[in-house]
């Protein structure tokens, strides 16, 4: 699965943001700092902070986080079969790769945690 969340294009929840807010939102959504977002939007850093407190911004960020979570669950689901096979192989072979086991455990635990909403 090669799906990605495009943080550069406005989604339905970002429609209420102004063009400058969208510029800043895109920077923040990609892991940038408030300072970087402020430079991109050509506003003061305090302005970005104020925008982050607005219901429109918070709704857009919540939607982005939800989308990212769903995508992560789908990707981990795709890896679940390989993780299960690695565990089955480890149970049959006394010298199974420790890295494979760790990776399989990580995939399974992450998927269970995300599906449980914890």
Image (spheres, grey):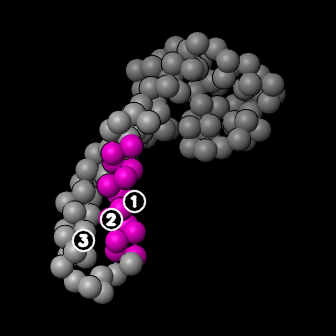
Query: Helix or strand or loop: what does disc 2 sit on?
Result: helix
Q: Work out whether 70 lies above or below 1.
A: above
Ranked by sequence position, the earlier of labels 3 and 1 is 3
The residue that appears at 30% across and 82% down in the rendered structure is 96
Q: Are marks 2 and 3 in contact (CB under 8 Å)?
A: yes
Disc marking residue 10: none
Is any part of residue 3 visible from this angle? no
Q: Mark 3 points at which residue?
A: 86
Quarter of the C terminus within the rendering: top left
Query: Helix or strand or loop: what does disc 3 sit on?
Result: helix
* Residue 40: image location, x then y, percent: 69, 37
* Residue 110: image location, x then y, percent: 39, 50
Q: Is residue 58 left or right of residue 51?
A: left
Disc marking residue 106: 1
Q: In this view, does 12 lie to the left or right of 30?
A: left
Q: Quadrant of residue 17?
A: top right
Query: Helix or strand or loop: what does disc 1 sit on?
Result: helix
Q: Mark 2 points at which residue?
A: 104
Classify mark 1: residues with Cα within 10 Å, few (<14), some (14-19) or many (20+).
some
Return the residue nearer the eye: 104 or 2.
104
Return the residue nearer the eye: 3 or 20.
3
The residue that appears at 66% across and 23% down in the rendered structure is 52
Ranked by sequence position, the earlier of labels 2 and 3 is 3
Q: Work out whether 49 lies above or below 70.
A: above
* Residue 78: image location, x then y, percent: 24, 54
- Give, as a single range, the part of the protein colored magenta: 99-113
């Amino acid at each position: 699965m090669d799906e990605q969340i495009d943080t550069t294009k406005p989604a339905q929840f970002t429609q209420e943001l102004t063009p400058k807010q969208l510029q800043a939102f895109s920077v923040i959504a990609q892991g940038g700092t408030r300072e970087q977002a402020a430079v991109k939007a050509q506003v003061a850093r305090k302005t970005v902070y104020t925008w982050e407190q607005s219901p429109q911004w918070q709704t857009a960020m919540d939607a982005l986080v939800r989308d990212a979570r769903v995508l992560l669950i789908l990707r981990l689901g795709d890896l679940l079969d390989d993780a299960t096979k690695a565990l089955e192989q480890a149970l049959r072979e006394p010298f199974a790769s420790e890295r494979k086991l760790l990776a399989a455990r990580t995939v399974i635990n992450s998927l269970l945690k995300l599906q449980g909403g914890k």
